Image (cartoon, rainbow, N blue to C red):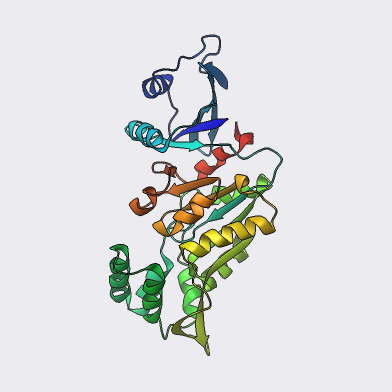
């Protein structure tokens, strides 16, 4: 069965449903105030969590990407997010959530904050802009930006880390993912020192990020080891799922940039969070109006 999820900060009325899905009719024997009622060949379930409201339409037929985009555009007028999910995460089975870090788990881009601290923000931003405009690949751009960090002390990472803020709803994710017997990992194009500090505070089962070469507590401006790019994110998502014996059907991937596309498409459920257009062009599901706590509606147990 396919699940269509409508998520909003406000209750979703029956009139919005009938306007968006004009071929559906509610069963009068089940008023809207009840948890579930039938519409043609489908069922509707309602849930409210963390101040968000969700309507789940359970149906046999899955929608094409073009249909999902069309419905999402209609619902955007009412600031309602729309997701089309093949299967929600099953009850009593371990699932896996894999997140990008910068602008996904946290609001900031760590390399920008490090560059500001080191007085090289403009130089780093110029490389970033060139890369986003297609002037160079991720690996080359990362190496060039890291070169500008040469001379930065190791202590600077702790100072920058203390300034970082969780993205809206992520605190709730750290509550309900472990509570649903699931694991959480982070695959980041950022830097290992930040993820190491982060994993000491939050329930992160594993992480991968870029290592920075250092000599006597000072960074040399070189990357140590492999670069965690879009291809490596996909590889490690599959590797960790395999090592944890969690099938891809029970894996959720969340990110915000084009660098996350392969990872999101490798998971059974890939969600863009306030995603950049470069990512939206490559995926089907994303969240524009609510926040990360909307991920709670991916669990069967929520309804």
In the picture provided, is 125 more to the left or to the right than 202?
A: left
Q: Residue at left 36%, top 21%? A: 19
Q: Where is residue 297 in the image (x, y as percent from the top left)?
A: 55, 38
Residue 204 seen in render? no
Q: Nearer the viewer, residue 302 or 254?
A: 254
Q: Position of residue 100 (x, y in %)?
A: 49, 58
Residue 22 seen in render? yes
Position of 75 relative to 27 (above/below): below
Q: Nearer the viewer, residue 97 or 70?
A: 70
Split into 4 quadrants, where in the image is the N terminus?
A: top right
Q: Which of 27 and 157 is in front in this view?
A: 27
Query: In which quadrant of the rendered view does residue 240 lie?
Result: bottom right
Q: Where is residue 41 in the image (x, y as percent from the top left)?
A: 53, 18
Q: Residue at left 55%, top 13%? A: 30
Position of 177 relative to 8 (above/below): below
Q: Where is residue 112 in the image (x, y as percent from the top left)?
A: 37, 69
Split into 4 quadrants, where in the image is the C terminus?
A: top right
Q: Residue lying at the far bottom in this picture: please name it.
A: 216
Q: Nearer the viewer, residue 127 or 67?
A: 67
Position of 173 relative to 28 (above/below): below
Q: Residue at left 41%, top 17%? A: 23
Q: Residue at left 46%, top 50%? A: 168
The total number of labels drawn is 0
């Amino acid at each position: 069965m396919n699940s269509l999820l409508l998520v909003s900060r406000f209750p979703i009325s029956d009139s919005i449903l009938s306007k968006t899905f004009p071929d559906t009719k509610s069963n009068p024997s089940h008023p809207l105030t009840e948890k579930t009622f039938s519409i043609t060949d489908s069922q509707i379930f309602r849930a409210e969590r963390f101040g968000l409201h969700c309507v789940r339409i359970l149906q046999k037929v899955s929608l094409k990407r073009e249909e999902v985009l069309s419905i999402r555009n209609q619902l955007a007028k009412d600031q309602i997010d729309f997701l089309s999910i093949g299967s929600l995460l099953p009850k009593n089975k371990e699932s896996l959530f894999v997140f990008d870090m910068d602008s996904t788990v946290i609001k900031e881009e760590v390399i920008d904050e490090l560059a500001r601290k080191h007085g090289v923000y403009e130089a780093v931003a110029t490389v970033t802009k060139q890369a986003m405009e297609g002037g160079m690949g991720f690996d080359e751009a990362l190496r060039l930006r890291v070169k500008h960090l040469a001379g930065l002390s190791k202590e600077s990472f702790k100072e920058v880390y203390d300034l970082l803020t969780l993205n809206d709803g992520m605190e709730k994710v750290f509550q309900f993912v472990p509570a649903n017997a699931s694991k959480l990992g982070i695959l980041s194009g950022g830097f290992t020192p930040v993820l190491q500090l982060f994993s000491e505070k939050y329930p992160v089962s594993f992480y991968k990020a870029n290592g920075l070469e250092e000599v006597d507590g000072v960074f040399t401006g070189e990357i140590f080891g492999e670069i965690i790019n879009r291809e490596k994110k996909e590889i490690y998502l599959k590797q960790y799922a395999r090592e944890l014996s969690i099938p891809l059907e029970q894996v959720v991937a969340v990110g915000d940039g084009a660098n996350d596309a392969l990872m999101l498409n490798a998971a059974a459920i890939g969600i863009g969070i306030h995603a950049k257009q470069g990512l939206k062009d490559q995926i089907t599901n994303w969240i524009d109006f609510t926040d990360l706590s909307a991920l709670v509606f991916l669990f069967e147990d929520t309804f």
